[in-house]
Amino acid sequence: PFKNKKNHKVILRIDSDGDLFKDITKSFYYAFLFSVGSIIFNSIVLQTSCAKIKLSKYILRKEKISIVPDGFSKRLYKFKPHNLSGRKNIVLIVARVTEIKGIEVLIKAFSQVYLSYPTWRLRIVGPIEDDDYFKKLQYVKHEMGLDNCIDIIGDLTVDKLIEEYDMASIFALPSRKESFGIVRLEAIANGLPVITTEAGCAEDLRGVIIVP
């Protein structure tokens, strides 16, 4: 196996749910990378069982595969049981404001919920990385008459983010693609029920509601 000058073992970590092979050029690239990597690296670390299923056929030395899910800081996020006491009628999403996160899908779904439960709010927390997509979200919520019940907060410090988790009653993440989706772990640790898509191998998580 490949070793550096200090004789340390070298690990190849692949941050993906395994959904990499839609483009033929990328398919050859990743197939070559994983095949060669499984020979020269001491270990190949994947984040999810889905990644192992999808990528193992491209990894020659399958005995080198390990699944190591992402984690979170127990110092910052204390495990809390699900308890609605003291929480508000808030659906929370924590995500980069970019199209791959599917936030407009959540806004449209929330508009239907709001018709029956007008005391609820949707709060969108995360850095605005795509200005055009941000404008699209503003347009969608305005056209649906939801300006007064949807807040796009932007990026927050960790302390402020924990306050958002503590206030909310439901966490939602409608991503089109994720390598893992660590915010779902953070939400679970903060006692929130999670509604999410299959992206990032959500099936590996216990107690989440998965929608197509």
Image: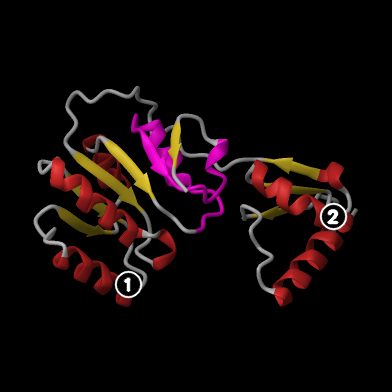
Q: Is residue 167 magenta?
A: no
Q: Mark 1 points at which residue?
A: 133
Quick check: can you spot residue 76?
no
Judged left or right of residue 145, residue 212 is right
Residue labelled with disc 2? 38
Kindly identify the amino acid type of the residue bearing the numbered disc 1: Tyr
- Tell me the SS state at disc 1: helix
Say which mark, if any, is on residue 58.
none
Against 137, residue 116 (above or below) is: above
Q: Residues within 10 Å of mark 2 (few under 14, many from 20)?
A: many
Residue for point 63% across, 46% down: 47
Mark 2 to mark 1: distance in Å? 39 Å
Q: Which amino acid does label 2 sit on?
A: Ser
Residue at figure coordinates x 22%, y 67% from the top left: 140
What range is drawn magenta here? Answer: 177-204
* Apparent side of residue 127 relative to residue 151 in the rendered image (left or right): right
Q: Where is residue 206 in the image (x, y as percent from the top left)?
A: 50, 30
Give the mark nearer the N terminus: 2 vs 1.
Answer: 2
